[in-house]
Amino acid sequence: MMWWHSRYGVPKTWVSDNATHFKNQVLALLSKFMKAKQEFVVAYSPWLNGSVERVNRDVLQVLRAMILEYSLSYQDWVHLIPLVQANLNHSPVPSLAGRAPIEVFTGLPCPSPTSTIFVPGYAPISVNTSMQTIEESLAARD
């Protein structure tokens, strides 16, 4: 939250459900210190925050698939969050006139979300290098 606030400013209001990790003394003090208002909605109420619950379900499904795809340990899920987040932020949305959230937020064209994956202990893969290697291999056959 502090990173967000330092970069974009303090929102006048932030909304969360009544879960204990959102409704506690630390966040109450933070809210008071930043002169922001924290509002709460009823947990698991799809009529209030159904789109958030839907995205969370999709995120979990994508994380499970990626853990299997990359043959990672379940403890390494945290390293996939930047890729999943980038995918959500870089995917066009009908409600944003077919634009991606990052494009609307920054006004800049969308970079590839695959440039954000980093898992310690795994060598990064360059798509361009891999493609060049494949093309050279195919050319050598001719």
Image (spheres, grey):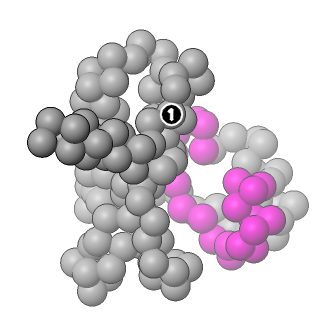
Q: Looking at the picture, how far across and down is residue 106, in whole percent? A: 55, 79
Where 55 falls versus 7 (above or below)?
above
Residue appearing at x 87%, y 61% in the figure: 33
User: Residue 21 or 117: which is nearer the viewer?
Assistant: 117
Q: Position of residue 2 (x, y in %)?
A: 77, 55
Depth check: give the residue in front, 23 or 78. Answer: 78
Left or right side of 86 for 136 = left
Q: Note whether 36 is above or below 19 in the view shown.
A: below
Side of 24 relative to 132 (left or right):
right
**Residue drawn at x 25%, y 81% as measured from the top left:** 98
* Residue at disc 1, secondary structure: loop
The magenta region covers 1-22
Q: Is residue 11 magenta?
A: yes
Q: Is residue 74 at least partly visible in the picture?
A: yes
Residue at x 51% of width, y 22% of height? 122
**Which residue appears at 33% of the width and 80% of the height?**
99
Task: State whether residue 4 is above or below residue 23.
Answer: below
Q: Position of residue 18 (x, y in %)?
A: 51, 45
Which quadrant is home to the N terminus?
Answer: bottom right
As shown in the figure, which amino acid type bears the numbered disc 1? Pro
Where 105 sits versus 91, above or below? below
Return the residue nearer the eye: 112 or 93: 112
Query: Is residue 9 inside the magenta stretch?
Result: yes
Is 60 left, or right, of 2 in this rendering? Answer: left
Read off the residue under disc 1: 124
